[in-house]
Amino acid sequence: MRPEIGGMRQDVSKRYDEDVLVERDAGMPAIFEWRGRRYQVIDVIGRWRIEGRWWADGRDREYWRVEAKGGAVWDLYHDRQRDVWHMERLWD
């Protein structure tokens, strides 16, 4: 159950920042594998990019907030400098 603050439901997330394998379809994540389990993406909720020297290390990341089959919402990002994918956050 999600906690309520001031009568409003608050989303809760857990940060992982672990490597994942991602298969794309038309440039968007379609399937990802995390901790040996495959997840099918059923919806892309959002997309944004962090680049430049925001944290003084020249990061270039493309983030994807996706809903996987079963209803869980995940934040994935593609590290464009190293060409690797990470699962950053899982939302309840």
Image: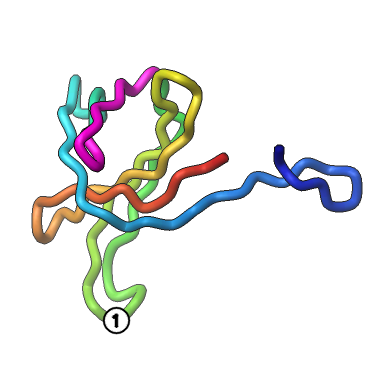
Answer few, some or many: residues within 10 Å of disc 1's Cα (few below 14, many 20 plus, some between 14 and 19): few
- Which residue has dot 1 on it? 56
The N terminus, quarter of image: top right
Residue drawn at x 24%, y 31% is 37
Q: Is residue 59 above or below residue 31?
A: below
Q: Residue at x 16, y 39 (%)?
A: 21
Q: Image check: 88 left or right of 52? A: right
Between 42 and 13, the residue placed more toward the observer is: 13
**Boundaries of the magenta span:** 33-42
Is 1 placed above or below 25 here? below
Residue type at the position of mark 1 = Ala
The C terminus is located in which quarter?
Answer: top right
Q: Secondary structure at mark 1?
A: loop
Residue 77: x, y in percent?
Answer: 29, 48
Is 31 displayed left or right of 23 in the figure? right
Asked if residue 56 is positioned above or below residue 33 in the image, the reply reads below
Above or below, 23 against 21 in this view is above
- Provide the major secondary structure of the magenta segment: strand
